[in-house]
Amino acid sequence: MLMSFVVDDHTFNVDQKLPSEEKGPIPYPSTIPEAFTNTVPVCVPESGVLYPVETFSDLAFSDIFLHLLTGNLTLLGDEFALEEFCTSLFDGFFLTACSRKENVHRHVLRLLLHLHHKVAPAKLESLQKALEPTKQSGEAVKELYNQLTEKLELRKPSPAEATETPSMELPLPTVPTPASR
């Protein structure tokens, strides 16, 4: 049933990218099947909503599930530009467990390492503050956080580059033409 939901979601994504004359009558699944309500969170990118559903024994925060979830989320890069999507995903799901589960912290940092350039700058700044490692954090979290910080620093233009805008005018070389010989 989960695979069916994923296929429906992917089919809808592809259909939305087609020119309007080629689109089929594919309705987007707007409700989550009842069987999902006690198993896992389901992310619906088109609406920018993450459905945080109750899980048994923190199953949603297991390494196996988080690996699959974050791996699939990397394919949804454009969705990370949406504030509502990021708020639902990070604030409503990941950050609820980051402080108590180091594996969640690692997965979120890895996700941001891949998609930092897609996330809105204000949201990225707040995430960077929220994900700062504590003294009790393991070396893996500290290393991932340092990698993210370095990538973000590289993206920021230096003050000299920001003030100097290069001229777009290029001198054209003179080339002799047959008539000028």
Image (tube, rainbow, N blue to C red):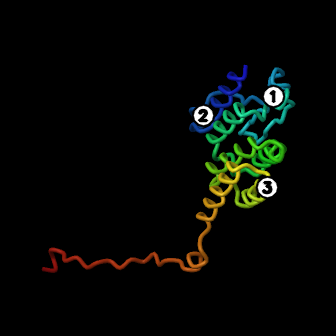
Q: Secondary structure at mark 3?
A: loop
- Residue situated in front as seen by the camera: 142 or 13: 142
Distance between the alpha carbons at the discs numbered 1 and 3: 39 Å
Q: Which residue is mark 3?
A: 134
- The circle on residue 14 is 2
Q: Residue at x 63, y 51 (%)?
A: 113
| Residue density around tag 3, few if under 14, some if 14–19, many if 20 or more, within 10 Å | few
N-term mark: 1 or 2 = 2
Residue 85 location (% of width, % of height): 76, 46
Q: Are marks 1 and 2 in contact (CB under 8 Å)?
A: no
Looking at the rendered structure, the kind of residue marked 2 is Val
Q: Secondary structure at mark 2?
A: helix
Q: Quadrant of the N terminus?
A: top right
Q: Which residue is mark 1?
A: 31
- The circle on residue 136 is none
| Residue density around tag 1, few if under 14, some if 14–19, many if 20 or more, within 10 Å | few
Looking at the rendered structure, the kind of residue marked 3 is Thr
Q: Residue at x 64, y 37 (%)?
A: 71
Dot in front, 2 or 3? 3
N-term mark: 2 or 3 = 2
Q: Residue at x 63, y 46 (%)?
A: 77
| Residue density around tag 2, few if under 14, some if 14–19, many if 20 or more, within 10 Å | few
Q: Quadrant of residue 161?
A: bottom right
Residue 156 location (% of width, % of height): 62, 67
Q: Quadrant of the C terminus?
A: bottom left
